[in-house]
Amino acid sequence: MSPTGPGRPSVDPSAARSGERPQAGAPDRAVPVHGHITDAVKAPDLVRLAPHTVLARFETLKVYAALGAVRTLLERGTIAPGQTVIDSSSGIYALALAMACHRYGLRCHIVASTTVDATLRTQLEVLGATVDQMPPSDDLRLDQERRVRRVRDLLVERPGLHWMRQYHDAVHYTGYREFADLVAAALPGRELTVVGAIGTGASTAGLVLPLRQRGVAVRLIGLQPFGSVTFGSDRFQDPEAIIAGIGSAIPFGNVRHELYDTVHWVDFRHATAGAVGLLRDHAVFAGLSTGAAYLAASWEAARHPEQTFLVIGPDTGHRYSEQAFARHREFPDHRTLKPHQITDLADLVPPWSVMEWRRRRHDHPVPPSPAARQESPK
């Protein structure tokens, strides 16, 4: 398999470093014709934001996770064509899983967050997925726990369902090895700083583990919202929090705390300031987790100008158009913002904090709720 995936042209590392595009009609640049749309959308566009900062801009990052997981489960015989797979999602994994099921002849059932909008729900339904959506709620912890309970109820009612368990099954790491191959080809240095939302843990771990195995010295910077149990910010509430997929109200088994060197906690307003800044500075329309990553990477790059930064942009900004981008005049210039630097979780404070995590385990995990205990790995 080529570093950029089947059917895609190879990356010219020198062009990636310079930001140049290959000449049209160059003999070594065949135009790919994809057999399925997932091959076209799974790999990111690499965009140079600064001399030593590159954005991996995805339409839907989790296509890598869903394709890798589904393909591996089919190869193992864990699932079979025609079977129904089910999972909970706040958005982009739902679409990625529905697309993977379309490709491999599976049925798909999504238990959707209240944050899933009408456009995405329509896409899922046209793709053939069935959708259970949680009722409106301002409490994302309640929303997540409701989804878990609904999945478990459906598993009892319909024993033939296979639960994908994107939060806990490390099979979701497998697809990101292809992303790691692409990064290694485009940014072939021996040192790299990766900045990305932590979320379920699969995308950052699935990228960084293969790179470190290659001998690349990867510094991993993770992004969290306030109100997430994953890295201990659950005692806070962000009343405007709509940054889907960046944190969690329940513990996730796929998060490996010991992989992270640094953690930034960013609230809605700062993440939106970063997303608006990315659009103004570089014409890149991306979601709020990308905005948080851009904000953190800009601050980190100013402090470590000798390092090469890769910023992960998991999705586009369309689902945040009304609630965030339409209010762009309300938010400060991201270049004027600075984090509160802390050395202990006890000192964590909104709206933006940063801590050197130093690849340690989470010493004080939050006791899970009853629904979370049901969801925990066996």
Image (cartoon, rainbow, N blue to C red):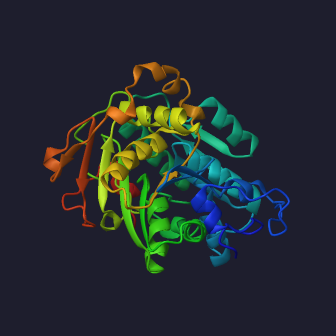
Residues 179 and 190: in front is: 190
Q: Vertically, is 118 above or below 11?
A: above
Q: Residue at x 75, y 55 (%)?
A: 102
- Judged left or right of residue 91, residue 253 is left
Residue 211 appears at what percent x and percent y? 48, 73
Q: Vertically, is 114 above or below 330?
A: below
Q: Residue at x 53, y 46 (%)?
A: 89
Look at the image and tell me whether residue 357 can be seen: yes
- Judged left or right of residue 158, residue 356 is left
Q: Quadrant of residue 46?
A: bottom right
Q: Residue at x 64, y 36 (%)?
A: 121
Q: Vertically, is 59 above or below 77?
A: above
Residue 26 appears at what percent x and percent y? 83, 63
Residues 46 and 250: in front is: 46
Q: Quadrant of the N terminus?
A: bottom right
Residues 277 and 40: in front is: 277
Q: Residue at x 26, y 41 (%)?
A: 339
Residue 194 appears at what percent x and percent y? 43, 60
Q: Quadrant of the C terminus?
A: bottom left
Look at the image and tell me whether residue 248 can be seen: no
- Judged left or right of residue 81, residue 345 is left
Residue 29 appears at what percent x and percent y? 80, 65
Q: Quadrant of residue 192?
A: bottom left
Residues 360 and 282: in front is: 282
